[in-house]
Image: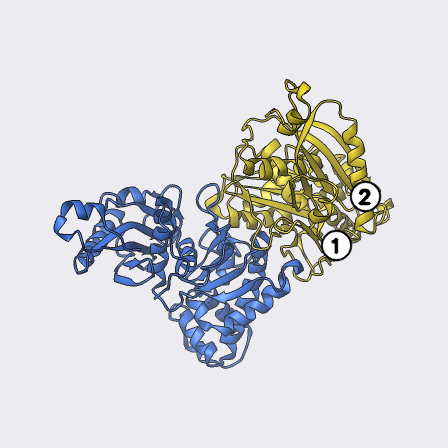
Chain colours: A blue, B yellow
C-alpha cells in the first residue's frame, strides 16, 4: 500500500525514488474531547492528539482549534506521507450530507454542515458518519470483523451507539441516520431519555444507564456496599465496573440487570439483520465476562430459535487500541480509497 | 422487454418474426395452499392456479402434484412465451441455499432442498426466499416501493413476516434467514409462540394474535358483542375485521391493542434500518384505516425523534392484486433477470 504520489513526484523530482506512506486522517468528535490521528492501512498510528470539544460553544472556533492542532502535529512527522482522505466519526453524523444533526451532547445546535466547513481547512476527500458506524468500519478494517459481511457493533459509552453492517456495507437508511439501537424501546413508561422519549435502551445499557440502575438497586435493597458513599454526580460507570470485578453485590446485580435488557434488545436486532457476530465496545465492555456472559445468556434466551448457536457475542478487538482514531480513519480506507480502486489488504494487521 | 428467443428462432425458423413474451413463473408456498402463476414484467398474470399444501405430507408427491398442475396450465397458454426463471416464496426459505428450513407450518420437517428437487422438473434459473421477502420484492417491482431503496414490508397473515430492504437489496443476513420481525420480543413472559419462545410480536400482531386478543378482552370486559357466540376455533380474523368495521367495541379495542404493539415494534425496526416507508400487507391490513391510523399513532409515539415525520406507514399497493404470485415472480425480475444484464423498466405498471 505504498505508492509514489504523483504530485510529490512532479513537484520534487529529486525525490523520485522515495516512497511515500499512504495514510488516513481520523477525527472522532465526542461530547467532551475530540480526538484525531493519522494511521496507515495496517492501523499503525503515526500521530495523534486531542482538543476539548465542550469548551467551544461555536463551531468555527472549534474548527480553528482542531485544524490548528492537526496541522501542528502533522509538521512533526518526519517521513514523507500522503494523506488519502479524512474520516470523521461524530454523534448524529449524517453520511449522505456530511452534516452533524441535532446532536444532544454537543453545543452546536441544528444542522452543522461539518464537511463543507472542514473543506475550508483541508483540500482532501472526506467522509463523515456517526461514531458507532465508524467503530463498525474500524472493526471491519482493523478488528474482529475482517472476514465478516454481516455484523453489528454496539458501543456502550455515555449512550448506546450501534453500527449495523449487512452485505459488507453499513446500513445508512434512506436519510443517512440509521442504526439507532440505543433508542429502541425497553419500557415505554420507563426512564427519561435525552432524546425526549422514555424507556430507550440507552437509558439502561450504557455508562449512564448502569449508574441509574445502581441507584435504583440502592433504593430497593439493604445490602451494604461502598457504593452508598457516592453521590449521583460522583459515581462513574468505571467505579461500578471496578466494584463488580471485586464482587460487590449491587454492582454485580446492576450488570446482570443491564445485560438482561441488552441481551433481549440485541436478540431483537439480530432478528432483523441475522448477523454473524455482535461486537460490544466501550466503557461497560471493560467488565469483560461479567457483561459478555450474562448478555449471551439473555441473548440466547430471547433469540429466534432458528438463529440459535449461529450468532456470536464478542468483545470488540479494538478495545485496547486507539479505537476512536482507527474507526474514523478506517472510513477512509473503506469508503474513499476503495472507491478509487485501491484494495484493502484482507489480512491487514491492527496495531 | 420483448425479445426474440434464440432457441425458438433456431428451432423454428418459420417463426423468426414472431416475438415471444418474456415471463416469470412464481410459486408461493403457504401452509394451506400453494399458489402459482405466470406473469410478465409489467405484472400482468397470464396463468394462475393452486394446489393444497397440507394434504401432501411428503415433499415428493407435493412436487409431482405442483409441477403437474403448472405444466397443465402452461399448455393452455396460446401465445409464444419464454419463461426466464422461477421465483419461490416459502416460509423459512433460505435464499443462499434454496432450502426450506424447519418451517413450523409445513409438514415437511428438517431442511428441504427445495430448489434442488424442483430442478428435476424444470430446467430454469430459480430463486427462493421466504414469503415476506418475496412480498418486499413484489412491492419494489410492482407496488408502492418502486422508487425506494430503503423500506420494510410487514405481512400480517397467520403469523407476522417481514422483508427489509436497504440500499435497494433485501437483508438476508449471514445465513440467508434474516427478517424475523415476527419473533422480536414484546412480553418475555407473554403468549406462547409456535417458535418455542414466549411473547413474540406475531403472537400479538397477526391473524392469530388478534384472535387471542379478542378472547382476552372477552374475559376481562362485560360489554355485549356478537363475538361472544364464537368458539376459539370458529372465530377468524376476517370476522374480527368485519366486526371492527361495523363498530363492535371489542373488535375495535382488539385492533387498538394490536396496533399499539405493532407500532412500537415497527419503531424499533425503523431505528435499525431507517426506512423511507413501512408497508403493511395481509389479512389484518384489510381493516384499512382502523389498523393504519392507530399503528401510525403508536409508531410516532415510540419512534426516535430524529426520524419523526420522515417515515411513512402505508398499506401495500399489492393488497388487492395477485400478491403471492406477483411477489414470487418479482424475484425472477429482480434477482435473475437483473443479474443477467436485463433492465427492469422503472415505471413498469402493475396490473
Using the image as rendered, state which of residue A39 and residue B299 is in the foreground.
A39
Using the image as rendered, state which of residue B309 and residue B31 is in the foreground.
B31
**Marking on residue B64:** 2
- Mark count: 2
**B154 sits to left or right of A117:** right
The quadrant in which residue B7 appears is: top right
Looking at the picture, how far across and down is residue B72, in whole percent? Answer: 81, 32
Residue A290 vertical placement versus A36 (above, below): below
Using the image as rendered, state which of residue A209 and residue A313 is in the foreground.
A313
- Say which residue appears at 66% left-offset and 19% top-offset: B18
Looking at the picture, how far across and down is residue B323, in whole percent? Answer: 69, 35
Establish whether labels 1 and 2 are both on one chain.
yes
**B108 sits to left or right of A250:** right
Q: Which residue matches tag 1?
A: B104
Q: Quadrant of the C terminus of chain A?
A: bottom left
**B249 sits to left or right of A196:** right
Which of the two discs, 1 and 2, labels the residue nearer the N terminus? 2
- Say which residue appears at 37% left-offset and 71% top-offset: A234
Amino acid at each position: 500500500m505504498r505508492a509514489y504520489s504523483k504530485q510529490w513526484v512532479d513537484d520534487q523530482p529529486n525525490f523520485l525514488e522515495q516512497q511515500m506512506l499512504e495514510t488516513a486522517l481520523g477525527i472522532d468528535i465526542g461530547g467532551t474531547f475530540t480526538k484525531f490521528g493519522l494511521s496507515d492501512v495496517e492501523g499503525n498510528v503515526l500521530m495523534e492528539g486531542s482538543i476539548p470539544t465542550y469548551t467551544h460553544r461555536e463551531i468555527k472556533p472549534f474548527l480553528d482549534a482542531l485544524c490548528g492542532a492537526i496541522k501542528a502535529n502533522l509538521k512533526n512527522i518526519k517521513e514523507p506521507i500522503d494523506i488519502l482522505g479524512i474520516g470523521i466519526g461524530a454523534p448524529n453524523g449524517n453520511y449522505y450530507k456530511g452534516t452533524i444533526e441535532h446532536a444532544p451532547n454537543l453545543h452546536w445546535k441544528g444542522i452543522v454542515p461539518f464537511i463543507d466547513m472542514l473543506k475550508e481547512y483541508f483540500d482532501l476527500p472526506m467522509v463523515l458518519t456517526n461514531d458507532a458506524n465508524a467503530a463498525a468500519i474500524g472493526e471491519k478494517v482493523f478488528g474482529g470483523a475482517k472476514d465478516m459481511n454481516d455484523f453489528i457493533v454496539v458501543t456502550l459509552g455515555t449512550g448506546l451507539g450501534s453500527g449495523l453492517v449487512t452485505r459488507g456495507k453499513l446500513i445508512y437508511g434512506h436519510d443517512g441516520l440509521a442504526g439507532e439501537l440505543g433508542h429502541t424501546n425497553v419500557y415505554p413508561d420507563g426512564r427519561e431519555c435525552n432524546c425526549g422519549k422514555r424507556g430507550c435502551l440507552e437509558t439502561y445499557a450504557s455508562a449512564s444507564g448502569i449508574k441509574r440502575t445502581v441507584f435504583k438497586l440502592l433504593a430497593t435493597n439493604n445490602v451494604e456496599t461502598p457504593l452508598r458513599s457516592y453521590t449521583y454526580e460522583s459515581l462513574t460507570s468505571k467505579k461500578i465496573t471496578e466494584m463488580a470485578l471485586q464482587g460487590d453485590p449491587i454492582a454485580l446485580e446492576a450488570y446482570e440487570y443491564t445485560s438482561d435488557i441488552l441481551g433481549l434488545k440485541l436478540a431483537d436486532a439480530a432478528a432483523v439483520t441475522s448477523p454473524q457476530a455482535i461486537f460490544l465496545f466501550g466503557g461497560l465492555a471493560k467488565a469483560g465476562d461479567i457483561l459478555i456472559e450474562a448478555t449471551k445468556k439473555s441473548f440466547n434466551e430471547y433469540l429466534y430459535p432458528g438463529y440459535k448457536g449461529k450468532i456470536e457475542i464478542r468483545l470488540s478487538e479494538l478495545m485496547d487500541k486507539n479505537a476512536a482514531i482507527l474507526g474514523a480513519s478506517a472510513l477512509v480506507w473503506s469508503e474513499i480509497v476503495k472507491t478509487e480502486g485501491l484494495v484493502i489488504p484482507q489480512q491487514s494487521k491492527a496495531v
